[in-house]
Image (spheres, helix red, strand yellow):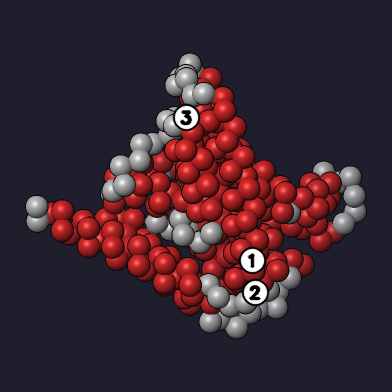
Amino acid sequence: MSLWEAAFLGIIQGLTEFLPVSSSGHLVITQYILGVNKPGITFEVFVHFGTLLSVFWVFYYDIKKIIKAGLWITSDLQARRMFYLLLTGCVPTGLMGVLFHSFFIGVFNSVLTVGFMLLLTGSLLWMINWKVPGKKKVNQMTFWDALLVGFFQGLAIIPGISRSGATISAALFKDLNRETAVRYSFILALPAILGASLMEMRKLLFGINEGEVLIFLVVGALLAFLSGVLAIRTFIRFLHLSKLHFFAYYCWLIGSLVILWQVTQSFN
């Protein structure tokens, strides 16, 4: 891996992790169509850590309040409710990741599936863009709402389905207001990203060392962090301006091109 490849992959990881265009889908596409090799395990751990820091940076004060309330250090009832709602949302995501792990691994080998899932993501974004915002706040959010959002986050393991797009769509369809939907969706991403990082780190502990140069790891993680912060703030701004249809167009375009490419390849 060159320094430029490390920089490119770090930026792509940060942008696609939080913009509603599916980071895993773009990984599959770059691997199979553009010929970009899959980065090593160590590099993946570093860029995931960079995206993890992005969420902490943007939602630091919210996360601090939620953790302190969840540990009963403070008596902020709304933050404590958010803490338990986040724990609830992690349940379906974790179960789906464990029970259907082999299925999801198989899906990662199908570029055609990515194309169709991108079309689905685009359709979700189009629908929620024109939906009248709900009014439910954290204190009105139910644990069934949390389970549904967590279920949609689990579905986003399938490449081509955007995690941020799927979870915010679910939250808005359950009539949460935009502020609550955004906070819940992005903070719920923390355990998912952390879990993915720990899974990769476990491979390192078993002695897999691919000899990445330290500067490549640092550059990839730093750019994943910076592009992740930019992506989160861009997504929030587009959501409040009701401009998510632009991401829908992008997903439809890329999905259609991928499907067309696969169909063409089958005739060669």
- Does the rendering let one see residue 70? no
| Residue at the (51%, 40%) spot, across then down | 7
Q: So how many labels did they put on this image?
A: 3
Q: In the image as oriented, which residue stretches furthest toward the left?
A: 268
Q: Is residue 232 left or right of residue 151?
A: right
Q: Between 5 and 244, which is closer to the camera in this rendering?
A: 5
- Dot 2 amino acid type: His
Q: Between 168 and 265, which is closer to the camera in this rendering?
A: 265
Q: Which mark is residue 240?
A: 2
- Assess disc 2: are there few (<14), some (14-19) or many (≥20) residues with their C-alpha within 10 Å of its C-alpha: few
* Contact flag, marks 2 and 1 (Cβ < 8 Å): yes
| Residue at the (33%, 63%) spot, across then down | 255
Seen in the picture, residue 135 relative to 165 is either above or below; the reply is below
- Assess disc 3: are there few (<14), some (14-19) or many (≥20) residues with their C-alpha within 10 Å of its C-alpha: some
Q: Which mark is residue 218?
A: none
How far separated are the C-alphas under marks 2 and 1?
Answer: 6 Å
| Residue at the (61%, 63%) spot, across then down | 234
Query: Which secondary structure lies at badge 1?
Result: helix
Q: Which mark is residue 41?
A: 3
Image coords of residue 8 (percent x, y): 48, 44
How far separated are the C-alphas under marks 1 and 3?
Answer: 31 Å
Query: Which secondary structure lies at badge 2?
Result: helix
Q: Quadrant of the N terminus?
A: top left
Q: Is residue 262 left or right of residue 7?
A: left
- Dot 1 amino acid type: Ile
Seen in the picture, residue 215 relative to 164 is either above or below; the reply is above
Q: Between 126 and 13, which is closer to the camera in this rendering?
A: 13
